Amino acid sequence: MKSKADIVIIGGGIIGCAVAFNLAKKGMRNIVVLEKGFLASGATGRCGAGVRQQWGTLQNCLLAKESMTILENISDYLEEKVDIELKQRGYLLLSFSEKETEQFSKNLQVQHSLNIPSRALTAEEAGEIVPILNTEKVHSAAFCPTDGHANPFLTTEAYAKAAEKRGVEICTFTQAKAIKTENGKVKGVQTDKGYIETGRILNAAGGWAYEIGEMVGLKLPVFSERHEILVTEKVPPMLDPMVMSFSYNIYCQQTPNGSFVMGHGPKNEKPGHNVNSTWQFLEAMAQKVTYLLPDIKKVRVVRQWAGSYNISPDRQPIICESEQLPGYYMAIGFSGHGFMLGPSIGVYLSELITGETPSYDVTLDLGRFARNESIAEPSVV
Amino acid sequence: MREDDIIICRCEDVTLGTIRELIRQGYTTLEEIKRIARCGMGPCQGKTCTPLIAREIAAITGKGIHEIMKQNHRPPFGGVTFEEIVSGRDEE
């Protein structure tokens, strides 16, 4: 392991690896990524593997669209032939009320201003796209045919490999233990395998973002919350798009290998790092999905798991350099959509770190809460 | 038959050759190999292949089996249909 670095990135998920790749591409040398487990072992590798561009705020639409463009061209982008199991068969968002339909049409306008090819559908048309859908209570739907699926492990691996090729040192099974500061500046990181002297660190620790803030005395406004998920055996294709509803609280997709992956947002979940599985989730999920997609009832569940959402006050990421501690960067609080925004965030953050003018005009800094400029994004699950 | 062609994970058709190649590339944990090659992700959830892969990791890296077999066990124990789960609910 290097004893001196230009930046130490804490976290080997999609964000850490994407930032490392982008910085290396810009010519930064001596980049170290610390990952306490294996790559994508935290939130990234536990996510639902969906990539959607149907958001309600302009900046989320922009970041999601830019991310999708990168994923569509990932081999050219990383200059390496890679397969990330990208499947673009759309996201079908279901509305169950007049009010939700109104929100969808507002969202569509925002999406169309960036040429995202989403459209409004009647319940009947939704049923044509997903013949196994029970449209009984569906009020309307929104559909974007270029949304879809990417494999989180393979995507993270691809970024990591491309970063290593450009000189980045990726240390898996290496934990950041303490951050040394002096006169209000970052000086270095103590790991369980040695000390690295550095003037810059990036907190990209996903579910452990708060703890990495505590290491320098920052009380970052994020907490972790368990979100459960399950996967089935693989079966022949029967569901093209990701089916999702904010009000019915479910997402469900059939991945390219044929297995279904599905989950929902928990109720009354205590903040913390518990990622155990529960039978209550299995039962609730079975109930929900067999109502919405009745033909799925004969499919077998083979595994449950869970991961942490790192949640911020407005459920939008916080990306900036700390005002109190120059050299301390953070990319935290992704609140469940870090994987799908990862590729564009990698670009944006690398520009913040090198001091270039950012490619995207977005407001994601920590100061937004004090300024009362929280992001009002209606489309989160 | 070449040894490399032996199927180690019967659910996902992963060969011994693939497993050995990944270990040589530096993926020396069950978790990493599973996520890249899909072995252990099928209907049996690694009940057959996990010890076989652990043995290969041990043979190549010299680590003890007990150091390697540390992965998490998750429910359900065996595959169960949604229908069975729903029908097993208590009447309300």
Image (cartoon, coloured by chain):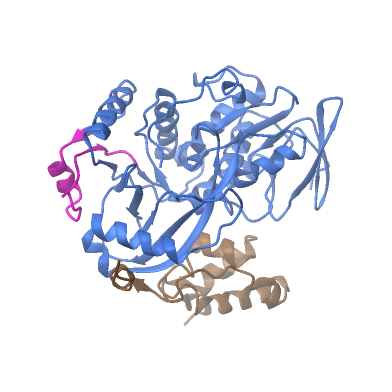
Chain colours: A blue, B brown
In the rendered image, the vertical position of residue B1 relative to residue A190, given as above or below: below
In the rendered image, the vertical position of residue B87 relative to residue A144, given as above or below: below
Relative side of A47 to B92, left or right: right
Q: Position of residue A88 (x, y in %)?
A: 32, 44
Q: Quadrant of residue A223?
A: top right
In the rendered image, the vertical position of residue A228 relative to residue A150, given as above or below: below
Q: Position of residue A70 (x, y in %)?
A: 44, 35
In depth, the one of A348 and A221 nearer the eye is: A221
Identify which residue is drawn at 33% across, 23% down: A110
Residue at the far front in the pictured view: B92
- The reply to whether residue A32 is in sight is no
Circle count: 0
Q: Position of residue A177 (x, y in %)?
A: 78, 47
Relative side of A243 to A5, left or right: left
Magenta stretch bounds: A120-147
In the rendered image, the vertical position of residue A133 relative to residue A323, given as above or below: below
Q: Is residue A139 magenta?
A: yes
Residue at the far left in the pictured view: A124
Identify which residue is drawn at 53% across, 48% down: A44
Residue at the far right in the pictured view: A182
- The reply to whether residue A152 is in sight is yes
Identify which residue is drawn at 50% across, 31% down: A314
Q: Is residue B52 magenta?
A: no
Q: Position of residue A112 (x, y in %)?
A: 29, 24
Q: Quadrant of the C terminus of chain A?
A: top left
In depth, the one of B74 and A278 nearer the eye is: A278
